[in-house]
């Protein structure tokens, strides 16, 4: 694998006037990152994030990180989830709105939730003002 190869990298998110995700960077070309083609319109917002998984071969084996211990999330995994939550909480209100959660799902190789999926999610996990709370986000990963 090339040293500059990567998977699931996202270095920018483009949203429209309604804060819906329009495009994300999904691939690397030379020294830059690329998105799928889209029509840029007035009022679109580009957010630089720098989230990703760059693959590089290591000369030594790293210990595997334990995700769950005694039925609970381990501290290192919980800290990772908290950092991810903060990264996608674009408006810093302590909640993941449907659009912010949509950006998270796009970044993790899925599609934004449709109405039924969002209703199911907000019906099962802790929400406030129609946004997923940090506690709900953590519980979702247990």
Image (spheres, rainbow, N blue to C red):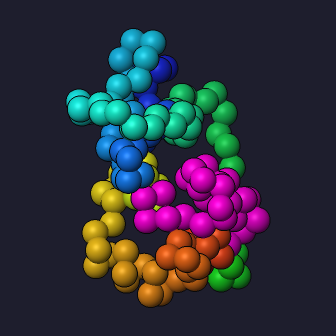
Residue furthest top as drawn: 30
What residue is at 46 percent from the left and 61 percent from the top?
A: 101
What secondary structure do most residues of the magenta stretch adopt? helix
The N terminus sits in image quarter:
top left
Residues shaded magenta: 73-100
What residue is at 23 percent from the left and 32 percent from the top?
A: 39
Looking at the image, residue 23 lies above or below residue 123? above
Q: Is residue 128 magenta?
A: no
Between 14 and 7, the residue placed more toward the observer is: 14
Q: Where is residue 35 in the image (x, y as percent from the top left)?
A: 32, 31
Q: Position of residue 107 (x, y in %)?
A: 43, 48
Looking at the image, residue 52 lies above or below residue 21? above
What residue is at 39 percent from the left and 37 percent from the top?
A: 44
Q: Can residue 117 be seen in this view?
A: yes
- Image quadrant of residue 92? bottom right
Q: Is residue 99 magenta?
A: yes
Q: Position of residue 58 (x, y in %)?
A: 61, 30
Between 22 and 83, the residue placed more toward the observer is: 22
- Image quadrant of residue 112? bottom left
Q: Is residue 7 visible?
A: no
What residue is at 67 percent from the left and 43 percent from the top?
A: 62
Residue furthest front as drawn: 42
Left or right for 71, reference 129: right
The C terminus sits in image quarter:
bottom right
Between 40 and 138, the residue placed more toward the observer is: 40
């Amino acid at each position: 694998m090339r040293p500059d190869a990567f998977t699931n990298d996202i270095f920018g998110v483009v949203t429209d006037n309604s804060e819906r995700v329009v495009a994300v960077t999904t691939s690397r070309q030379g020294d830059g990152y690329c998105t799928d083609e889209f029509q840029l319109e007035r009022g679109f917002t580009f957010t630089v994030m720098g989230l990703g998984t760059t693959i590089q071969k290591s000369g030594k084996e790293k210990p595997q990180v334990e995700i769950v211990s005694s039925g609970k999330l381990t501290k290192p995994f919980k800290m990772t989830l908290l950092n991810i939550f903060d990264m996608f909480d674009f408006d810093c209100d302590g909640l993941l709105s449907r659009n912010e959660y949509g950006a998270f799902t796009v970044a993790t190789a899925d599609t934004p939730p449709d109405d039924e999926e969002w209703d199911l999610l907000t019906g099962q996990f802790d929400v406030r003002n129609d946004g997923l709370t940090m506690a709900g986000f953590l519980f979702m990963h247990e």
